[in-house]
């Protein structure tokens, strides 16, 4: 669960979500990624580190350039967790709807006697 917590922490920030979207198109250098954000490079690097620590992004040094790439496996795990939660809540809401319909039918039956 700690890994899932780190993934959701990473997704909690708009800049990091934007970086993930950028990397969905393929690997990119930190410089290319940073150019699309209005912040100093050291601040941007903090976002990259959070993404790396969560495992969503991997980076490697190629000469003087740090290249980043998306590792979607953990996003897929998070999606699976969200899907399971959605099914749980849909089931609960379906049972609530059925209960309300039962109450309404009983009320209508009692009112028409």
Image (cartoon, rainbow, N blue to C red):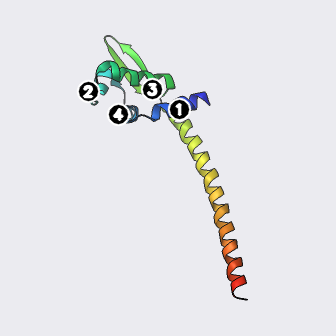
Label 1 secondary element: helix
Q: Real-space Cα distance between discs 4 and 3?
A: 13 Å
Q: Nearer the viewer, mark 1 or mark 3?
A: 3
Q: Real-space Cα distance between discs 1 and 3?
A: 11 Å
Q: Position of residue 96 (x, y in %)?
A: 66, 62
Residue 69 shows in this picture: yes
Q: Residue furthest top?
A: 63
Q: Residue furthest bottom?
A: 113
Label 4 secondary element: helix
Q: Mark number for residue 22?
A: 4
Whether label 4 touches label 3, CB < 8 Å: no
Whether label 2 touches label 1, CB < 8 Å: no
Q: Real-space Cα distance between discs 2 and 3?
A: 17 Å
Q: Position of residue 61 (x, y in %)?
A: 37, 13
Q: Position of residue 87 (x, y in %)?
A: 61, 51
Q: Is residue 25 above or below residue 83?
A: above
Res. 79 image quadrant = top right
Upstream in the sequence, badge 2 or badge 3?
2
Res. 106 image quadrant = bottom right
Q: Which residue is mark 3?
A: 51
Upstream in the sequence, badge 2 or badge 4?
4
Q: Front-most of 103 and 23?
A: 103
Upstream in the sequence, badge 1 or badge 3?
3
Q: Which residue is mark 1?
A: 74
Q: Real-space Cα distance between discs 2 and 1?
A: 26 Å
Q: Which residue is mark 2?
A: 35
Upstream in the sequence, badge 4 or badge 3?
4
């Amino acid at each position: 669960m700690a890994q899932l917590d780190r993934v959701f922490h990473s997704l909690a920030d708009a800049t990091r979500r934007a970086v993930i979207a950028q990397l969905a198109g393929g690997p990119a250098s930190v410089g290319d990624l940073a150019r699309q954000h209005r912040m100093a490079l050291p601040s941007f690097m903090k976002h990259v580190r959070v993404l790396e620590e969560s495992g969503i992004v991997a980076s490697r040094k190629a000469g003087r350039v740090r290249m980043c790439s998306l590792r979607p496996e953990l996003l897929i795990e998070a999606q699976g967790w969200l899907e399971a939660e959605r099914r749980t809540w849909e089931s609960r809401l379906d049972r609530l709807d059925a209960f309300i319909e039962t109450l309404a039918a009983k009320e209508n039956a009692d009112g028409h006697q």
